[in-house]
Image (tube, helix red, strand yellow):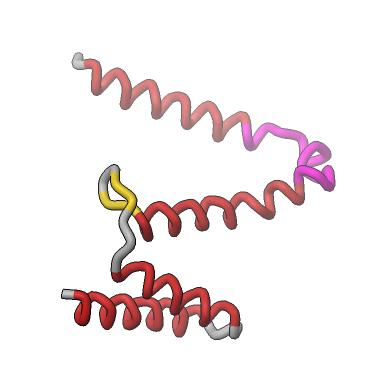
Amino acid sequence: MSIQWIAVIGTSVLAFALKYVGHSVPPKWLAHPRITRINALIPIVLLTALVAINSVTVKTKIVIDHRMAGLAVAITALYFKLPFPVIVLGAAVGSAIAYHFGH
């Protein structure tokens, strides 16, 4: 068995164990106000990190390109509280226009 398979199996066992332990946490602990606030922020932080990494990096380099135009359109649409599909389409169109005129 190769080291990669050992790593895959080990990671799978660890993921299962963490999920099992997570389901075993008493509801009383999860109802604590601090835990509730932290749990509400986790998806926002993860999505923000994903957008940041995918917007300004190519492999290991930081770049400013057409994706920043799409991000600017999305931020503007969010400011005006537009519906989510409009935000996504606007960002895609803004990025495509910047890409077209940038090349």
Kindly identify the residue that appears in the image at 42 percent across and 77 percent down. Answer: 88
Kindly identify the residue that appears in the image at 21 percent across and 76 percent down. Answer: 102
Say left or right for 68 vs 81. Answer: left
Say left or right for 36 vs 67. Answer: right
Kindly identify the residue that appears in the image at 43 percent across and 25 percent down. Answer: 13
Say left or right for 58 vs 45. Answer: left
Q: Nearer the viewer, residue 48 or 10?
A: 48
Q: Nearer the viewer, residue 15 or 73?
A: 73
In which quadrant will I find the C terminus?
A: bottom left
The vertical placement of 94 against 14, above or below, is below
* Residue stretch rendered in magenta on the structure: 22-35
Q: How many marks?
A: 0
Residue 61 x %, y %: 29, 47
Magenta segment includes 23: yes
Q: Nearer the viewer, residue 57 or 43?
A: 57
Residue with the most extreme left position? 103
Kindly identify the residue that appears in the image at 29 percent across and 18 percent down. Answer: 6
The vertical placement of 13 against 22, above or below, is above
Say left or right for 15 vs 101. Answer: right
